Image (cartoon, grey):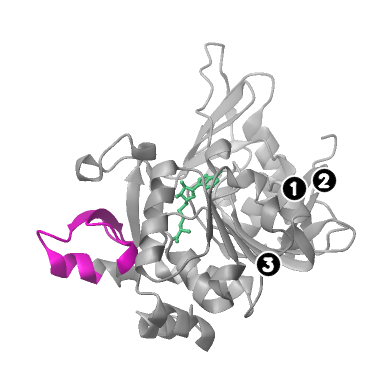
């Protein structure tokens, strides 16, 4: 697995290779689980009935889903909504290298899951430097047992990671392994100046992004987006369902077709997400980029040149205007955007934190 990750470019640091070799992933995979390859349908793995497939999946670049629906649906009766997992090794290593933790650093992990990442971190920086918070009681108990069987004893907390864990602060690094819409300022407060927070930022407007924030002495945390990332959201920040709406829809032709906007790339996506932070979107990229949008009590549907909008706001019109602003800036790519987190909230910027991305009038 380490060789495959090195060949794929995710693993470049020998210290993380050593951690992969020292903390065997199969010790964290339950007897029955759901393997979730990126490029193929998921499948059940069962150590008793088919040990070869189980072991192969443990060392493939697959996420291994260990919980559906917060435990309400059994793994053998799934799939259900994914709520806990061992993240795919390629994603784990990519994030760990981005975090750039050093020996003896103090690291806070949010979302212990089955504990594999906490085990890797314990090898890299020393278990006494690692604190990991998990919100689900059963998942937490399993992580305690898994890590003990791997001979690692980081400080494991059952609690809501949104609050961080002030007891062991300040941290040099905060590693977040669940998707985050609003970055809790507590994480910044608990990180020393010069420290780093790596997280998957997942705005309501799809998709999600890998983000590396550096904490500065003025109390802000800011940094660039470094790629794409899709994770399970923090429990308290999970998506609300679209609003039900009985009012009249207004119909019109699109000024800009959805394919133009949704196929323009991550730079356009993150710019729109930054300009309209309360806007949620779900896009069917397989079916002509038809999309559903909602924010507050407004919603919209767009398909080809047809737009239907309801509520006080014309949501597709807002997206069209935001997209045209991005085009007007010369269509900057994702790497030129970043996020800044301050005590009062967060904002997306382009090129520098002094240049927030905003819609006029908002
Ligand atoms: C993708 S899994 C974590 C992967 C894991 N770190 C690994 O080693 O592969 C995400 C975990 O975050 C947990 N989680 C969700 N919301 C949380 C919160 N508010 N605080 C702490 N943990 C949370 C979930 O229960 C789940 O176990």
Q: Which residue is mark 2?
A: 343
The reply, left or right, for residue 141 in relation to residue 198 is left
Q: Which residue is mark 1?
A: 185
Pointers 1 and 3 in contact (C-beta within 8 Å): no
Q: Is residue 334 above or below residue 271?
A: below
Disc 2 versus disc 1: distance between alpha carbons? 6 Å
**Labels 1 and 3: the sequence-earlier one:** 1
Camera-nearest label, 1 or 3: 1
Q: Return the x and y of residue 343 as percentages of the image width and height.
A: 82, 46
Q: Is residue 172 above or below residue 341?
A: below
Could you say which is closer to the camera, residue 212 or residue 309?
A: 212
Disc 1 versus disc 3: distance between alpha carbons? 23 Å
Q: Kindly identify the residue that appears in the image at 17 percent across and 66 percent down.
A: 53
Q: Which range is magenta?
A: 27-56
The reply, left or right, for residue 232 in relation to residue 216 is left
Q: Quadrant of residue 243?
A: top right
Task: State which quarter of the image contains the C terminus.
Answer: top right
Q: Return the x and y of residue 191 as percentages of the image width and height.
A: 74, 60
Does residue 33 belong to the magenta stretch? yes
Pointers 2 and 1 in contact (C-beta within 8 Å): yes
Q: Kindly identify the residue that appears in the image at 39 percent across and 82 percent down.
A: 21
Secondary structure of residue under mark 2: loop
**Labels 2 and 3: the sequence-earlier one:** 3
User: In the drawing, what numbered circle is on residue 338?
Assistant: none
Could you say which is closer to the camera, residue 1 or residue 74?
A: 74
Does residue 117 belong to the magenta stretch? no
Secondary structure of residue under mark 3: helix
The reply, left or right, for residue 121 in relation to residue 77 is right
Q: Is residue 53 above or below residue 73?
A: below
Camera-nearest label, 2 or 3: 2
Q: Which residue is mark 3?
A: 335
Q: Kindly identify the residue that appears in the image at 64 percent across and 79 percent down.
A: 102
């Amino acid at each position: 697995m380490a060789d495959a990750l090195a060949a794929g470019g995710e693993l470049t640091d020998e210290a993380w290779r050593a951690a992969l070799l020292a903390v065997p992933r199969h010790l964290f995979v339950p007897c029955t689980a759901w393997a979730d390859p990126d490029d193929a349908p998921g499948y059940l793995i069962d150590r008793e009935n088919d040990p070869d497939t189980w072991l192969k999946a443990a060392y493939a670049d697959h996420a291994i889903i260990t919980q559906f629906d917060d435990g309400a649906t059994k793994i053998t009766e799934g799939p259900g909504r994914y709520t806990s997992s061992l993240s795919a090794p390629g994603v784990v290593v990519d994030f760990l290298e981005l975090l750039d933790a050093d020996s003896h650093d103090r690291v806070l992990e949010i979302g212990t899951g089955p504990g594999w990442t906490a085990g890797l971190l314990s090898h890299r920086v020393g278990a006494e430097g690692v604190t990991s918070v998990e919100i689900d009681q059963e998942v937490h108990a399993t992580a305690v047992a898994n890590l003990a069987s791997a001979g690692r004893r980081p400080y494991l907390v059952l609690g809501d990671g949104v609050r961080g864990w002030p007891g062991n602060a300040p941290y040099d690094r905060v590693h977040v392994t669940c998707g985050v819409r609003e970055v809790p300022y507590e994480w910044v407060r608990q990180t020393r100046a010069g420290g780093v927070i790596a997280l998957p930022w997942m705005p309501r407007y799809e998709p999600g992004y890998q983000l590396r924030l550096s904490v500065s002495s003025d109390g802000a945390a800011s940094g660039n987006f470094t790629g794409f990332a899709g994770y399970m959201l923090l429990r308290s920040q999970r998506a609300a369902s679209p609003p039900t709406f009985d009012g009249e829809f207004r119909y019109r032709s699109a000024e800009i077709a959805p394919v133009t906007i949704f196929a323009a790339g991550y730079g356009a996506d993150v710019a729109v997400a930054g300009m309209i932070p309360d806007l949620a979107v779900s896009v069917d990229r397989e079916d002509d980029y038809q999309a559903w949008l909602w924010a507050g009590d407004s919603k919209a549907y767009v398909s080809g040149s047809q737009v239907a909008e309801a509520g006080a706001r014309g949501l597709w019109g807002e997206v069209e205007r935001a997209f045209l602003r991005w085009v007007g800036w010369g269509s900057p790519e994702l790497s030129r955007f970043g996020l800044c987190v301050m005590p009062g909230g967060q904002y997306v910027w382009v090129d520098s934190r002094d240049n927030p991305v905003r819609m006029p009038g908002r």
